[in-house]
Amino acid sequence: MQTARIICPNGHLGFAPLKPESFAIGVATGPDFIAADSGSDDVGPGPIGSDTCTSPLAWQTHDLEAMLLAARARGVPMIIGSAGDTGTNSRVDLYVGLIREIAAKHKLAPFRLGYFYSEVDREYLRAKIRGGDPITGLEGREALSEAELDATSRIVAMAGVHPFRRLLEQGADVIIGGRSSDSAIFAAAALHRGHTEALSYYLGKVLECASFCAEPYGGKETVLGEIIDGGVHVTAMHPNQRCTVASVAGHAMYERSNPNYEFVAGGMLDMSHCHYEQISEKTTRVTGPTFVPIDRVRVKLEGAAKIGERYVGMAAVRDPYTIKHIDAVIGWARQQVRERFGETGYELHYTVYGRDGVMGPLEPVKTPAHELCIVVQGVAPTKEMAEEVCITGTRQMFYARLPEVKGTAGSVAFVLDEVLPASAAYRWSVNHTVGVDDPMELFPTHLIEIGG
Amino acid sequence: MQLRKLHELAKTIRSKNAGVDRITFDIIFRDRSTYDAVRRSGALSREAVLALYGLPESRLTDFVEFDPAYAIKFTIARLRPSGSPGDSDIFGAQQYAPLLDVDVPMPDNEPRDPVV
């Protein structure tokens, strides 16, 4: 069996730049693969809905350049999943273009670039629904209806190891993936080198967020993972970071409902019997994960539906009487919007900072602060209407009619007497899974020659 | 018995999205004895967490004691998916604050963490 030494310099490539010092140390250890995930659904439904990136192009380019130069210098594969935050087709094309530009800039010797798409055609899913093969909801959601399908702007499927393995088998030197499971990016590399599913997926699980599995806390630092004698060894590359039993086991919990199970297209990684052992200052060894394959693969789908255009306004309050009656102030402003636009056809949201702005109904503290800031969001089908909804909902707080207020010249303070255009409002409409006969059917792969 | 605040006992107290429909909370302790003492205290039981956040039981989707990390972890269902207009915490990263001041009855002989 071949070694599978993988370094990961960034848990979300592009969201913030990788740190060069620990990356250089990681490259000097002689990895077999350099890999990173570039996506997250944490960024909200806007980027996938509007087909844009959250991450700045400069940071994406910075990390792709560092990884490509290191990978080509060593002659090892570079693997990227979930291109451009969302892994939509346009983001894959963006990254393929960046790889091409970086290769030309540095006059790199020719290499093979593999890439795959993840966007899912609406009619493919409609046929499944009509054919009695439901698109099952995750986390308590109902099965996907045709109405929700039609409302959704864009849908991606979450690739497992399958397209990565296909491209590695075809000899790709660089892989740019559409939307992918974080762990699959790394697991595919280890599987390609002949390792077991259990250890390969665990390796992927622990590497996907880079230095989040190390301590002390510090993101965007490189970690090295490898499979040795039936265990996964994970090592921090930053001189001041260590991978400890606590930091590695703690990372198993990060961003998931249950620390014992990881679901991917093709099965489930069971970590409930993992054993963690500190084997040197910076390295922890993990043994005991198991992998439970599934008969018929189900692939996770993500999609967002547009609600409307959006404007944002702000207002603040200092008068204690007005603070005590802030709901009446908001109620007055809402009523003015209702009189102009009716009950429906728009959304108007108030977030009251200083009372429960961060936590809303979850806030246990019931006493407001001595001053409040209210953020107003107006959402409507057109920009013009969204602006008017928002300015009405914001400015009318100034004219709120409170019976015993002493200050009769205005109920709120404005930092700006205007409302600001914001990104369009979307909602996560698809968080579902679809059954597939062939795990590759949603992920068409391409292999091209770059340079020369 | 002595009352200690959870923030004095835990190494990490955090919240974060677990997918788009849920927020998960991690309370991680430095050592086995503190972890065991907090578990035994009942201050972080399912019922205690529901009461602290004013939630019905149906919104608590997972509650796990995770021995390898000396951690207590629970997950709640969001009222609406992350990033919907009006959602004030797209990453779910600031929902842990009420946990910091939870009173935990601890045995008097429980070792205190050294003051740094």
Image (cartoon, helix red, strand yellow):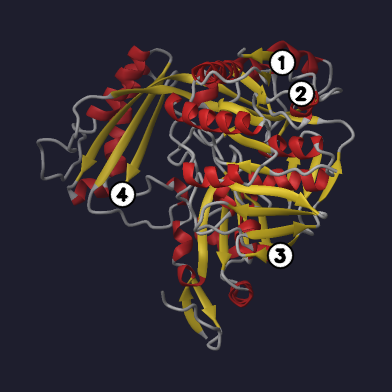
Kindly identify which chain the residue marked by label 4 belongs to. Answer: A
Q: Nearer the viewer, residue A43 or A5?
A: A5
How far apart marks 3 and 4 lie (CA) works out to: 46 Å
Question: Which residue appears at 50% of the width and 33% of the height?
Answer: A43
**Mark seen at residue A354:** 4
Report which residue position mark 3 lands on: A277
**Mark seen at residue A171:** 2
How far apart marks 4 and 1 lie (CA) works out to: 54 Å
- In this rendering, would B87 be left or right of A185? left
- Are discs 4 and 2 less than 8 Å apart at CB? no
- Identify the mark nearer the N-term, 3 or 2: 2
Outermost right residue: A295
Question: Which residue appears at 22% of the width and 24% of the height?
Answer: A418
Outermost bottom residue: B109
How far apart marks 1 and 2 lie (CA) works out to: 9 Å
- Are discs 4 and 1 less than 8 Å apart at CB? no
Q: Nearer the viewer, residue A109 or A273?
A: A109
- In this rendering, would A251 be left or right of A288? left
Report which residue position mark 1 lands on: A447
